[in-house]
Amino acid sequence: RVMCSVPRLKRAVLSWVPVLSWLPHYSFRENAIGDLISGCSVGIMHLPQGMAYALLASLRPVYGLYTSLFPVLVYFIFGTSRHISIGTFAVISIMIGSVTEKLGPDSNFMGNGTNGTVDYDRRDAFRVQVACSLTVLTGIFQILLGVVRFGFVVTYLSEPLVRGYTTGSACHVCISQLKYLFGVKPARFTGPLSLIYTLVDICRLLPETKVPELVVSLVALAVLIVVKEVNDCYRQKLPLPIPIELIVIAATIITHFCGLTSKYSIDVVGEIPSGLKAPQAPDVTLFSDVIGDAFAVAIVGYAINISLGKTFGLKYGYKVDSNQELVALGLSNTVGGFFQCYSVTSSLSRSLVQESTGGKTQVAGVISSVIVLITILKIGSLFEDLPKAVLSTIVFVNLKGMFKQFMDVPTLWKTNKVDLLVWLVTFASTILLNLDLGLAVSIVFSILTVIFRTQLPRYSILGHVSGTDLYLDTDTYKEVRVIRGIKIFRSSTTIYYTNAEMYLEALQEKSGIEIGKLLTQKKKRDAKLKRTQEKEKKKAKKEAKKQVRPISHLSNGTFSNESEMNERRVSAGQKRQSQGNGVESLTETPTNGRVNWAYQHDVTVSDSDSDTGGHINTQASHSGDEEKATHSIILDISTTSFVDTVAVKTMKNIFRDFGEIELDVYLAGCQACVVEQLETAGFFSESIPKSRLFVTVHDAVLHILHKLVSERLTIRGNS
Amino acid sequence: RVMCSVPRLKRAVLSWVPVLSWLPHYSFRENAIGDLISGCSVGIMHLPQGMAYALLASLRPVYGLYTSLFPVLVYFIFGTSRHISIGTFAVISIMIGSVTEKLGPDSNFMGNGTNGTVDYDRRDAFRVQVACSLTVLTGIFQILLGVVRFGFVVTYLSEPLVRGYTTGSACHVCISQLKYLFGVKPARFTGPLSLIYTLVDICRLLPETKVPELVVSLVALAVLIVVKEVNDCYRQKLPLPIPIELIVIAATIITHFCGLTSKYSIDVVGEIPSGLKAPQAPDVTLFSDVIGDAFAVAIVGYAINISLGKTFGLKYGYKVDSNQELVALGLSNTVGGFFQCYSVTSSLSRSLVQESTGGKTQVAGVISSVIVLITILKIGSLFEDLPKAVLSTIVFVNLKGMFKQFMDVPTLWKTNKVDLLVWLVTFASTILLNLDLGLAVSIVFSILTVIFRTQLPRYSILGHVSGTDLYLDTDTYKEVRVIRGIKIFRSSTTIYYTNAEMYLEALQEKSGIEIGKLLTQKKKRDAKLKRTQEKEKKKAKKEAKKQVRPISHLSNGTFSNESEMNERRVSAGQKRQSQGNGVESLTETPTNGRVNWAYQHDVTVSDSDSDTGGHINTQASHSGDEEKATHSIILDISTTSFVDTVAVKTMKNIFRDFGEIELDVYLAGCQACVVEQLETAGFFSESIPKSRLFVTVHDAVLHILHKLVSERLTIRGNS
């Protein structure tokens, strides 16, 4: 027993701590150089991105550097994707930023009394606490979801939703950075429509633009865009992309030595403390304030992470475990939260660089961390004169990919209007309701589209394609032939509570059988019959007989045949079951010879033989004029994938009501799981025997035609 | 043109004002007596119910009488249901009550200063204003929804949801009435969990129970229950149910003449002003405060109304127009709101009485209004000494039907666990989050269950039922035969964003083809091959040839056959299309003789002929060991009812990836509307020609087997 559990334990450990499974087999020859170059490139990208995104999160730049360090190391140990670069990301940063500004607004940190100055140190320290609490809670959510194997929640974020959401977030990011670009100080807004208010406020402040900052921004922007374009164009020819993020160094040097700060009072990054801080427990009392945002960050962060991870996994043929990714990301966040980091996810721009510069494993991540660590420990203070405007331009340039997603709109317009709607609603709600509420609204809307799509199905009457056993939509395919007296009805989608009533209505409309009217007619007729009978009983009995006989005679006849047929059907079914071992209700064995004969014979019979036709007409004369010939209805429910109580009730009502006006109803094309659900729901009973269930429409048609022939024979025999 | 438009106008008027279509043909002989008796019975019920439910709505009893009067008359003109009794209803009343108490709490109406007495007159006047505004807004919502033909919104309220909701509401009603029963005055609570708080508070106050009120309640309750049971038991024998609601008269008389009010200070109804009030416009400034509740009331009121209306419509075979009902109810509410009424809907208990006492048309409603009118004008003031406790007992007894719905729980447990979950979540959220928020949560949850149900489909590999053209699940049906080399894969539900990834995973798992691994292997092999080829080119060329040939030869061979087959298939397809007029891709015409021959022949060939078998194996040797024979995959997507971008992308990836490892992918069983959506989405291209689409699995199988035979012949011919 112990012997047996050791390998199992080992397997479990390896699956929870993936680094143990791949690091021992790390091939220096194959991977080391690629990982080293890739790690350095990514590390250099981490520096300005970390600082820039920290500003987005309304934190001091150094916290972005911390965030680029610790979580990467944790992910190295627990992650399963080899190519993604964990760290700061624009969308997550802005989500964090909205929380830190909401919980720690300037107004809370006014100095003693009302002297009007904000105590920035206290404010920033509080905001770090908020961000760390949020991050730890995010991590805990992710770990919990991962442990209970709930990685699938991310499937609720469909592709149009994620793209609309990230595009909307990009707009938020953009507008939050405009203030640095123009050097203005708009008021802070929170809650719905805050984006619009901020934009309006910035426009109002435009006349106060600080020209020096604008110039710095425009120069930096121009350089960044040109070099990025060069990188894109010569991607094939360049051994490495030009590390244009190093523009920050140039900008710092220029600012420092030209004394731009003092001359033009350009807003710079400011103090960057050297060295690491001791880990600190998050403020648990803040958890209740950030719980909603933490959940949103957990979901969005994971969604971005897993989609990128799966893309690389598919490209390079390795497996990215969605639940383990959730745990890895959760641990990165939880541990990071103790080290003054904020929430992380993988960044598209860095991951692409990591992959394209030859990174093969997460060792590249470790090397990038080393670079970040060196910066924090030794050269961080050199960046103190870096203008914030330059950092914003880096943010802007990195948003390019997200703004490209606006091209989804024309594409989706052409390909899928419902998904376009999801995209637009997500985008609009993200813009108008901000990132947390917007996400919730988008998810609900996206789920609602599934309802919309299944709520208005296409209903059709099926006809027979001659020479085959196919039954196709009579509206679309003109040459299919409707079999006389049999209506085959199909809904294009599953029947459930939102469309069950419509199913019944469509069935009546398409088949031309108005069940309500017919039932009333029948009741009146029955009542009249009863009255007549009672009257007649009181009087003499002879004259009444003629009037009464047709109905009673026929129904008697039908019933005797019915029961006889039932017996026959059951025995056939049993025979078949013993052959097919559970292939239920294949009552009419369609072996080649017999089926063809039976089928052709029957069709001819019901089409040409006036006797049978007459019989059908007689029987149908109870049921109004239009649907003279209809004696059977086959409901093709092959598209039904689950059954709820409303669907069962509707089906039962159809069987009962149509049964009352002497129409036989059959079910065809029922999936095995649907049959099980119908059984559990107590659908089958004496009035709806299981023999009404056929595997295909053709089987049901053959059965009905057989039954007709037998009835005809019985009637002939009787007469 | 004018001639033509007159009947159209007439039709429109008749459809908007249904009374014009039936009242002129009103048959006195048939209906008058029934309607008279029924109207009197319902009118008598209206009196105590109206007063009792007004207390539920936190209004003075006389407003319940108004509500039983005006809306009924409006509904008489515009309604399409003949049997329902419009008026006060417990659930709606409690919803109104929660709003009136929220917006007009006692604390707002403290007398001048803090002398502790509440100005009840001012409070009640304000509450009436709130209720009227809410009612008018409810009516406007309903009219708007009706005019834009949005009656279908009610379909989102599935049956388990409505039953869970009304049961939850009944609990609210019950607890709100306990205070009258025990004569205690608990504190008012609003917001989530207020029900729990109120209950706790009542329990706390139990020691202060006023014994006289409790005695009155218990006596009234005992009498009511006994008489109701007698009514139920002897329903067949009694010509009319005993109008036990008249207990209020007895109670009033006893209270009045025994002087209970002064002796035991029993809480009585109080002043009932005689006469009607002049209509008054609602306070528009309150609209913004009640908009959410108004929408909830509009939806719930309509849902209850239409479900009852449809039930009677089905029973008596007349049509209840859902949109016209919405308009009628909306007009009743809007007009009612001007006359100090609060929101109405049909009440189950009164409607059942109206029907069972012989009511045939809405004339019964008018007669009941006359009785209510007489009461208001003449005898209302007689009820001033009616104890409120007696009214509560009437409410309690009328809740019996709703509490019976607790029996749904065991029933649903047996029949449908998901619907049970909907019931329980609805009930719990109604209890805990109150009636407005609870409803929203329930609807969202109910919609989510559709996602749950389609998110985890059953995936299966299909096998052939010998002697037929059926393909069934190999797991369920043991005797079906898997056709060698062909994997037929089916999902039990539609493929869309929540399950698309799982579809791909299940396909790989069920078919045993690990696409990622195989692709990597192929890449390595290709790279190796390239390297080898390059090496060989540099060296001499002779030794290398043997190693290279098998793959290059085979793939060439396959491709030439492929294109040839494509041509053949296309021509066959065209022939078929001209025959079948749009029956697409029925490429292998399964006419009886040919199909059987081709089929049987092919199966034998592929099973026994070593040459073909060898060929398959050769081809499959590229694709790992387990799936030696797999050369084709058929995706049976007959259960797919709509297509979103994620599904299209997944399908495209399947075609691309499996194509790369030389597996042919086919689609079968595609519904016409799905084909259209795939076309719009740009699914079909050169790499995925439309000829990969087959109407049935059998067609696809036949095509593949044909192709194999042709290939074999070509290879034989070549060799």
Image (cartoon, coloured by chain):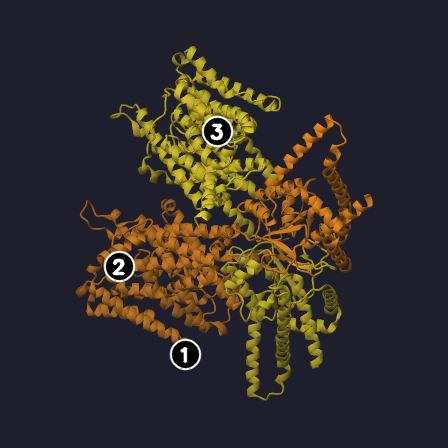
Chain colours: A yellow, B orange
The kind of residue on which mark 1 rests is Lys
* Chain for disc number 1: B
Determine the CA span between mark 1 and mark 3.
87 Å
The kind of residue on which mark 3 rests is Gly
Residue at image point 66% right, 68% down = A704
Residue at image point 20% right, 62% down = B210
Q: Nearer the viewer, mark 1 or mark 3?
A: 3
Q: What is the number of the mark on residue A365?
A: 3
- As drawn, which residue projects farthest toward the bottom? A540
Q: What is the number of the mark on residue B179?
A: 2
Q: What is the number of the mark on residue B237?
A: 1
Given residues A223 and A530, the one toward you in this image is A223
Q: Where does residue A218 sit, x and y in percent of width and height? A: 50, 19
Given residues B180 and A468, the one toward you in this image is A468
Q: Nearer the viewer, mark 2 or mark 3?
A: 3
Determine the CA span between mark 2 and mark 1.
38 Å
* Chain for disc number 3: A
Horizontal relation, residue A271 to residue B515: left or right: left
Which numbered disc flags the more N-terminal residue, 2 or 1?
Answer: 2
Give residue A618's quadrant in the image.
bottom right
Give residue A657's quadrant in the image.
bottom right
